[in-house]
Structure formats: structure tokens, C-alpha cells
Image (spheres, helix red, strand yellow):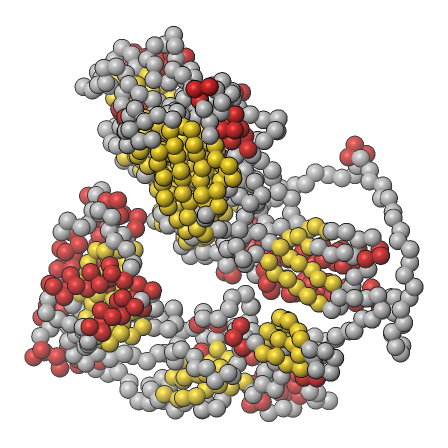
Amino acid sequence: MPGNLGDVYHEPADPASYGTVWKLWDATGEKKEKITNSDTGRVKFSPGRRRFPRNVTYADNIDESWQTDLTDFQSLKKDNDGFSYILCVIDVFSKFAWAVPIKDKSGPSIIKGFQAIFKSTDRRPTRLFSDKGKEYINKTFQKFLKENNITYIHTHNPDIKCLIVERWQRTIKSKLFKRFTHTEQYRYVDGLLDDIVDAYNHTYHRSIKMRPVDVTPDRVLEVYNNLYHGMNNSIKKPKYKVGDYVRISREKQVFEKGCTSNWSEEIFKIVQVIPHAVPVYRLEDLDKDPIEGTFYEMELQKVTKPEAFKIAYIVRSKGTKGKRQHLVHWRGYPKKSRSWIFDKDLTELAQRMELHGHWQAALIELHYPNTIAQVLEGENEITIMSDTFVDTVSAGGGQYYAGSSYQKGHGIGSWLGGLFRAVLSLLKSGATAVGREAARAGAHVLADVASGDTFADSAKRHTGEAVQNLKRKAASAMNWSGRAIKRPKPAPKRHTVAKPRAKLSLWLSNATQMGEGRSQWIMVSPLANFDAATTIEIEVAGVGYAYADPAHMLLYTKEKIVNADGSDITDADNSDATLVDASINGTVISQSSMTYPWRAYVEAFLNYDKAAKDTHLQQRMWHEDTPGHHDSLDSNQNLGLAWRRSRTKLSREFEMMGPLHLDICNMDRLLLNNCTLRLKLTRSRDAFALMRTKGTEKIKLLDVKLFIRRVTISPSVLLAHAQALEKSAAKYPVNRVDIKTVTIAQGMHSKTIDNLFLNQLPQRVIIGFVDNRAFNGDYARNPFRFQHFSLNYLQMHVDGQPVPSQPLTPDFSKDLYMECYNTLFTGTGIHWKDEGNGISWSDYPKGNTLFVFDLSPDMSASEPHWNLQKQGALRLDLRFAAPLPQPLNCVVYAEFQNLIEIDKDRNVIVDYSV
């Protein structure tokens, strides 16, 4: 017998439930139009089309329409005088193009680019088209356009691009990179770009059937016919009319994230039909506020006029019984749509249950750190309230916790620390029953988020399941036939649970790892000859069947020290260092600039104890200089120099092998298949790497190899990852390291360094001072001798707050520096643990003076979990007991928590600037 449409659709036991229009028509007898437009889940989950015919924008004459966009060349800015972008502009009609290098995406820089174009030609556009980038819609650039009588038009849909200029950008990039590959030079600002633009404008175009330079006013009609001949301009009859109610396809990406449905929760009204070859519509929301842009029919789904709205949550309430009002947030609607409603206007949903007596409302809070995605301070808490959670405080419940275990460890730059593998869920309640159900819900949320589901959707779903479980528990304590009857509260009972010792667990096997099938170390050689090269490039090609393990990547070199003419020498000391840049699939993820040697030194110096430094660190030629004698060339005074000299003297060949100090190498996550990792190693100057009185020696490379672990993944895991990548990108949390240096002039008594770090604030900061001559490379000076220079005052101000709260005021002349020495332990996570770094109190002022500050709110910079990202500025105040005898460099090492994402197409996205 036919039933109600909504009842049939939402009844899982009915064969027609969640089915097609035809199944619902057969089951209910309703008209097909009513079924199609009914506001059931069928509408929200019906597929939305992303590819469909769209209207063509016609250009009628030369310079009637220009298109513009920016091409990102940030990875090459060092080779091009700081120019990070190319402003690309093209005339839609004639296909005549321009390209101008600019340094940033600000409004003034865009204006300079257009001024350069206007200076080179007397042509001006009537209309300018672009995407909705902030570089174009800012007030400065808009004012410039108005002054030049240019009408500006931008797209509203991020899927819709200015295709003609996008094709011009692809041509530029293709030609440039082919040239870069041929010449092995990455500079384009010295005429190369101009040559490519000129060649493009003198190239025959099939669309206009001539060259752009040949398009003249007397050939406009010919070009127009070539471009638009044969196009269908007939106007199609609109499917919808003014007054219809619709949902919008989520493919438009202008609504909130996190819902698995294909259409918006919010309902809109059509207010205008614009006839075109493909009709488009203007909309307004139910508050009569217009929606920006126009929409195609394929982006709309007609529904019936809404008669009731679902409440997401109650923000606050006011008034007394009979006149009580609630400020409600409507589910799926923006914050501005909140409204006050009376109690009498509320309608309870099906399956709702009222609990009375000692069953009271409880509050459950889900706290989550920003492991999966960056969460700014102030966005760190989701509160879920339900009047069906029970609060049985008398049962003796306490706080409950559910989450995954995590590896504990410390390490500067996460060099030794494990990272989060999943979000931790913390749930609090005062009741035993609530606590257990909350813990279960939290564990389910954790599992869903780890597998790619959104936190908000998973939290709603699993807290709903917890509500149902609690209802069943409540039912056993209440008489459901008639009115509710409260049972007497039982006395609290405490039970002791016997747990067998592990030695008696004779029927339990160990956990089994099944995701990684097998692994092997592969060797990768440089792309070109490295003998006399200052730059060495190594590429680890991605393969489809295996993942790469950057945490297990080792660089091997064989070297010897020779005279400037290449002949063998009699004696020298070596402290070789390298600069390393890394990229994945062409996207640069780290650039070390000139500070990589200090990163490698600081991380090895502070992360390892004496036992490690005396064993496996010697593979990297590590042997500490005798404190106070870092610059000494006397082997009797400097034992570190004597050890390295014995390994390298008389042009003896020596080997080194060790990990690279890169952010991606400190993760405990495998790199997805088909991801190519490219490393660019730039050798340090010989004056920096060597210590020698004569100062004419150089280092000769004999062999370079990279070893990396490649892991074959089980087919089931590969399939699961492929399915997860269809929903969201893979996440790689990294502890990003950034090192800044500031020169302090000779004779200075004090120095204030403002805005040392802006915007994102670091989790940890390490400060040291190096002689300027050693920093820049001097055969007679050690660049890793961190001196105190009679410092007697040090304090930072992090977003206006002093760190430490009382400044450090050492007096090194009287051996009063205990607070400074203590930062080596409080700032690195050691803090009274049975660990160390091999730096004694007496050795601290003798070339080992570093100041370490943990800026995380819970002193957890060395722990694997993350903290909320904070924004602000960092200032450093320094004072010295005496004028500086020579210039020095303040070296500041900072750690940040950031995220690298790789999507299904293996595009790499980073949430920081490189």
C-alpha cells in the first residue's frame, strides 16, 4: 500500500528507501515532479554535474577584452633578483600577449607591471578579466583601473578560469623550463622572457588563422569570423522560473566544508532569469540578501518551499517559562541567519526522548589539537550539547580519556621526536555512563578523522550513537508503559578489576605489522658530473608500487683535501658542510639558503649525548673541538682538530655518511608512491669548510651517493590510500626549521632586533653568537664557535609578552651564568630526565654558549603533539658588558609546526612560504 513519501524514503527496511525517483514513485504513488522536488535526503545526495556547456564571452574588437593572471616562480626568485611572479596579460581578440616579472602579489606590484605594459604600447583594454585573486580586487589596483577607464570583471566560481591567459601561462612555463633544462641556468629576467614573448606574438595561431602582430583594425571582421564562425547563439528555454526554491551544488566551493552531500543545506530563491544560449540565474537567500554571481541550471536543484528548519544548536536563551526565547543557529545556514524563537515554535524531531528525575543534561567537550589541519588559536574547541546525555554524579565517575597512543621523545627540530599519527580526543564528564559512552564516541571520531572523514561530521554522527546507547541504559531504569518512574539511586560501588601480568598472558600474540610488505635500500647517483661542480642535484624518482621513506635517507661522500692547483697537500683540517634544497614533484618544500651548516651543527650538538657523539656521529666527521680552543690550529690544544687532521692529512681520502637535516627527513611517515623527490646540494666555500694557516687548499669530491629506503606496500593498503585520496589529501605534519641571522656592528653596547619573526610564531627558539669573520668563511676561524661576547642581558618579547618573564642577566666574568646554562635542558625537553647533551657547566662559556627557549604553552616543543598556531611578532633585546670588539652575527634557530599535503594527482601544497 503506498505510503508517505518521507516515511518511505527514510525507512531503511523499505525496499524503496534511499532509492531512485522510479522506485519512490512505484512505492508511494506520488507524482514524479513532487518526488523530484521533495526536500528529502534524495535531493542532497543526487549527483551534481561539474562539466557542462557554459556561455561564451565574446570579444568584438582589438583590446575590447584582456585577461590576466600571475604565474608563480617563487622557487627561482634567488636566481632572478627576487622576482617571484610573472604577470601574464593577453588580448582575447588578437591573442597579443605581454609578460612582466614582479616581486610580489601586492596591489602596487601589479600596478607597476601594468604600467610597464602601458609604457611599451599605446594599447589599453576596455575590459579586464581575471580570477578572484586578492592581488586584483584590492582597493589600490581597482583605483588604478578606474583612473584608466578600465572595467574590471572577475569570476565567482574558482572552477571557472580565464582560459586564454591560462593557455598563455602554460606556453611561457613550457618554453622557460625547456630552456632551463638545456642551459642549466634558471635566470629569465635578462632578456630570455622578452624573447619568448616576442616569439609568441610572431607565431601563427590556429584560432585567428594569423599571427597576433598581424591583427590590425582593417582585419577585425576577418579575425571575428575566424574566432566565432559556426557557434550556436540560439537562446535556450529556461528550466526554472522566478520564485522557485533551489539548493546549490557544492562543487561551486563557496559553502562550508565537511558535509558529504552534493548540495547545500541552505535553500535559496530564484529572483532573476537571464536568457542566454545557456540560461543563468540570480539568487537570494531566505533573508532576501542577494547571492554574488550567477548560476547555471546544472548547479541548481529545485526543491519545495521549506516549511520547517532544523536547528544546529541553541546559542543562548532568555526569558522565563511561557515567554522563554532561544537564539538558534540554523543547520547549514550562516551565522548572520541566527534568530530568536519562542518555546512554542519548537518542534521535536522523531526519536526524541525526554529524561526526567535524576537524568539530567550533561556537557561533553571534544578538544582536538591541530594535527590533521592547521587550527588557529580560538578555533580549538567544539562543544556538543545534548539533553539526552545522562549525568549520574553519584556513581563516582571522573574524567575519561580516549585516543591513540603516541611515541614520546625529545629532539630539536623533531630530530629525535616522533610525530602524531592521529588526533587525540579528550572527553570530560562527571558521570560514569556518560564517560564510557563519550570515550567510545571519541575513539570512533579519532578513527574516522584518521581515515579522512571530517571532524565535525564524525563528531555529530558518533555522539548521536552515544545518545542512543544512553537511551537504552535509561530505558532499563524507567517504566516505559505510562509515565516515567524514577528508581532509587543505588549506593556507589567500587570494583577492583584483576589484571593478569604480562608474564601470564600465555595465549596472546604480539601485534603484527601488515602494511609494509618489504623494503630495501636503494642507491641514487647525482644527475651530472660532480667533480668540479658547486651544485649537485640528486633525483629520487617516484614509482607506482612503492613508497619512499625520507626518515631513512643517508648521504655518502668520499673526499680529499688538495692544493688550489689540485695537487695533494701535507696537512689541513676539514669541517665540510653543504646547503640543501628539497622539492617534491617540482614543488619546493625547503630552502636552506646559507644557514644549513648551523642547523646541522645545532641539531647534532644539542640532540645527542656523549655516547652517540663518540660512536655513530663520527660517520659525519664529528669530533668536538676542545672547549676554549675552537680556533686553535695546534693539535695539542684542540683535540677535535687533531682527530679530524688524522683522518684527512696528506690528501688522504676520507668518507662521510649521515642523514640530511631537512624537515621532511624528520617525519615518521612514508612518502606516497609516484612522488619524485629532488635534492639540490650546494657546497660551502673552501674557506668556510677548512681551517688552515696558508689558506690555499680546497676540497675535492671523489664520490657522492644517496641511500634511501624504498618500501613496498601491501595491495590492500595501496587501495585504501587511493580511496582516501579521492576524499582528501595526504597530510605530512613537519617541524619546519627557519634560521635567521642578524649582523651586530663593532662597538655596539646593545641591540634590539624587531620583527625577528612575523605572523606565525615559533614553538622553540635557539640563539647563539658567531664572529662575523668566521661566519662569512675564514681559514683561521671556526664558524661553530658560539661565544658569549660578555652578554649581560637577553630577553625576547613574543607578541608583547616577555620571555623569559625576568631577563637573563649573566656575568660570565664571574662564572655567574647558571640560568643561561639551564636553558639547554628546559628548552630541549631534557629537564631533569636521565638524559644529557654532553655539555658541562664549565664548558658552556667556552665556545658552547647557546640559549634555548621553549615557547609552546605547555613546554612541549620537544613532544610529538602540536599546539594551536599563534600569530604575532617576536622581538629580541640584547646588551653587552663592554663594546663589541668586532662585528658578530646573531644566529637564531626557530621551529614552526606546519603541514605538507599531497593530493590524489600528487600536487604538493604547503601552508608556509618557501
Residue 530 in view (yes/no): no
Q: Is residue 427 left or right of residue 423?
A: right
Q: Is residue 579 left or right of residue 307?
A: left
Query: Nearest the camera: 792 or 577?
Result: 792
Q: Quadrant of the N terminus?
A: bottom right
Residue 156 in view (yes/no): yes
Tell me residue 463's x, y (percent).
69, 63
Vertical order, 538 against 780 (above or below): below
Tell me residue 296's x, y (percent).
40, 81
Residue drawn at the location 64% of the way across and 71% of the way down: 316
Q: Is residue 105 left or right of residue 828?
A: left
Vertical order, 25 against 482 (above or below): below
Q: Quadrant of residue 275?
A: bottom left
Query: Nearest the camera: 572 or 810?
Result: 810
Vertical order, 886 against 480 (above or below): above
Q: Is residue 489 left or right of residue 463?
A: right
Query: Nearest the camera: 711 or 878?
Result: 878
Residue drawn at the location 52% of the way across and 34% of the way down: 827
Vertical order, 582 against 598 (above or below): below
User: Residue at the left extreme?
Assistant: 218
Tell me residue 816's x, y (percent).
49, 22
Q: Quadrant of residue 68?
A: bottom left
Residue drawn at the location 30% of the way across and 51% of the way down: 74
Residue drawn at the location 88% of the way across and 66% of the way down: 477
Query: Nearest the camera: 79 or 891?
Result: 891
Tell me residue 836's x, y (percent).
55, 25
